[in-house]
Amino acid sequence: MSLQRRLLIYLLICAPLVWAAAAWVSSSRARAEVNELFDTEMIRLALQVQATLLGLDRTKGTPTSTAVSKEADLEDLAITVWDQQGKVLLADREGTQLPLLADAVGFVELSLQHQPWRVYYLQAPNREWLVAAGQKIDERDELVWGLVESQLLPWLLTLPVLLLAMAWAVRQALSPMRALTHELQQRTADDLQAIPSQQAPAEIQPLLQAMNGLFGRIDATLARERRFTADAAHELRTPLAVLSAQWEVLQSARTEPERVQAAGKLSAGMQRMTRLVDQLLRLSRLEATDGLTRAEPLDWRALAEQSMSDTLALAERRQIDLACEWPEQPHNPPDWQGDAHLLAVLLRNLLDNAVRYAPEGSTVTLRLTPSSVSVENAGAPLPAEQLGRMGERFYRPDGQAELGSGLGVSIAQRIAALHGLVLSYHPQADGAGVVAELTSVG
């Protein structure tokens, strides 16, 4: 259901309800005013009758009802007077006299000939007589509804005009939404420009701002995907060509030594390709992640053991000693929270790079302090240009003997960013070696 139709339905339902409530309130107020008016008249009438009785000479007989003009409508009114013994002294109606309630004082609502009446009883000061003045309640209701109808009828007659006016107003109010719909329908799939929201109504500005934020995130994601695809295609082209050439060499080898050498080169190429594809897939998953799905306190001992165990085979092959240094008591490692699996990948990549490019027979140290985590090796200090390019995808300095894809640092930096951490590279305090240091942004 469209928003316009929904608004119109709500208005069609709510407007009559509001009018009904207003009519009820109006009738209640009118009834109160009418009751007050007629009650006052009944009290005044009873007082006038009592004043007349005070000057009545009873020796001349019992008063009788007075004839009235035929044009006077007194069918809904009644007056009765009783003496102390309950004898009727005065009655303006025959056959429908008001009932005698000897102890009644003030207003009483009762039924007379199956019709509701409102009667005012007034006792004489010496209780010599009782005066009762009554009126049918229907007479009051007739006046109340006459007043209400006189006000409500014009509203009911103008209801169709009002509904048309509300429909036009709703349509005009929703014109910005139709304009936004038309603009989005005209856009192409790659048009992610922000929608101007300054001139939009205040009610839809949050929606436009949210949509512009979404467009920005989608544009950034597509840009990352395009860059990643281009980089991956460029990087995979060379290994595939090398593997094809090595396969041809293996097929054309005539002697056993030539075949063994060609098979070794092909196996190394396959290992490099496997590592590259694994790193590409891992980086792709990290690039598609906007934030951590879980964050929990970290067990640094378990992380250190796992990452060093994963790097142990490479360290033994290159005769590298792995060391781990902890903060001195009573200090503890950083009180960070995050995804233990991702941080294990980060530490493994840092240790893997440090072991691959450290001199054989040297030591690689994983050092934890209360505010940082770092991996150090004893290699030659890196030039400033190379330090500046650390983290650039597929970047590997020339002359590297170890296999690599140039993605390890990029993966580590992406994991660090997801945890609100910064990964930096710098020489050791004495100017030698390379330190990969992980610190908190705050």
Image (cartoon, grey):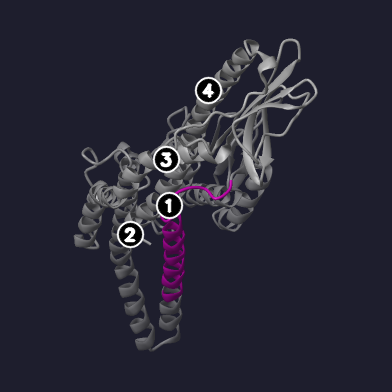
Q: Amino acid at mark 4?
A: Glu
Q: Main secondary structure of the magenta part?
A: helix
Bin the neighbour count of mark 3 within 10 Å (Cα to Cα): few under 14, some 14-19, many 20 and up.
some
The span from disc 3 to disc 2 (Cα, nearest Å) is 76 Å
Q: Amino acid at mark 3?
A: Gly
Front of the two marks 3 and 2: 3
Q: Is 322 or 351 nearer to us in this picture?
A: 351
> Which residue is disc 4 drawn over?
41
User: In the rendered structure, does residue 210 fall within the stretch colored magenta?
Assistant: no
- Secondary structure under tag 2 reads helix
Where is residue 356? Give x, y as percent: 48, 52
> Which residue is disc 2 drawn over?
225
Q: Is residue 375 left or right of residue 304?
A: left
Q: Is 74 or 1 nearer to us in this picture?
A: 74
Q: Which residues are magenta?
A: 266-294
Total number of numbered labels?
4
The span from disc 1 to disc 4 (Cα, nearest Å) is 42 Å
Q: Is residue 419 visible?
A: yes
Where is residue 239? Give x, y as percent: 34, 69
The span from disc 2 to disc 4 (Cα, nearest Å) is 90 Å
Circle on res. 13: 1
> Which residue is disc 3 drawn over?
146
Q: Is 33 or 189 nearer to us in this picture?
A: 33
